[in-house]
Image: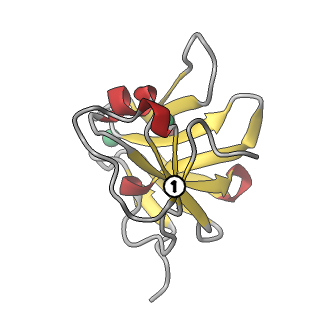
């Protein structure tokens, strides 16, 4: 089966495609991801931003930057679905929220980052994935 390289937001106003399948992925347990997603952790694939093309709805994408820094959060301003994050200083460093893919992106999460901040109300699964107290080392 070919990995999915296309995706969209909840309302379908934004559609995107990758020129290459994603090859790395992990879960983020940071408090920002908890607040923006409404979940205990966020599965995201890391990609080279140059492989990402917004097929439609670019004008719907809102980019929000936390005043304290970190990656920009990019989401559909119409339906609120989170799609990407991006290093504001390096647009080649991009993540795709895995739930945004149309089908199975092929890649599987292999790490859990920011576990120091994991939600108290949901135990981190004992799945053997590599764990990092803070972000994934470069
Ligand atoms: Zn939308
Ligand atoms: Zn996060």
Camera-nearest residue between 47 and 31: 31
> Callout 1: 10 Å neighbours few (<14), some, many (20+)?
many
- Identify whether 64 is placed above or below 93: above
Asked whether the viewer can see residue 91, the reply is yes
Residue 95 in picture, x, y percent from top left: 57, 48
Q: In this view, does 113 lie to the left or right of 86?
A: left
Residue 75 in picture, x, y percent from top left: 43, 35
At 32% from the left edge and 33% from the top edge, which residue is drawn? 119
Residue 100 in picture, x, y percent from top left: 39, 54
Residue 67 in picture, x, y percent from top left: 58, 10
Q: Quadrant of residue 76?
A: top left
At 28% from the left edge and 45% from the top edge, which residue is drawn? 123
At 44% from the left edge and 26% from the top edge, which residue is drawn? 32
Where is the N terminus found, in terms of image quarters?
bottom left
At 51% from the left edge and 71% from the top edge, which residue is drawn? 107
- Identify whether 103 is placed above or below 83: below
Q: Is residue 112 left or right of residue 49?
A: left
Label 1 residue SS: strand
In terms of image quarters, where does ligand 1 lie? Answer: top left
């Amino acid at each position: 089966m070919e990995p999915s390289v296309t995706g969209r937001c909840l309302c379908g106003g934004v559609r995107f495609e990758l020129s290459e399948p994603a090859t790395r992925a992990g879960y983020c347990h940071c408090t920002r991801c908890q607040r923006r997603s409404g979940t205990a952790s966020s599965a995201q694939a890391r990609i080279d931003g140059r492989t990402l093309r917004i097929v439609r709805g670019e004008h719907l994408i809102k980019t929000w930057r936390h005043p304290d820094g970190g990656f920009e959060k990019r989401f559909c301003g119409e339906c609120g679905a989170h799609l990407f994050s991006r290093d504001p200083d390096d647009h080649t460093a991009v993540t795709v929220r895995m739930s945004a893919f149309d089908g199975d992106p092929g890649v599987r999460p292999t790490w859990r980052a920011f576990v120091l901040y994991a939600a108290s109300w949901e135990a981190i699964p004992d799945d053997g994935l590599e764990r990092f107290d803070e972000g994934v080392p470069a």
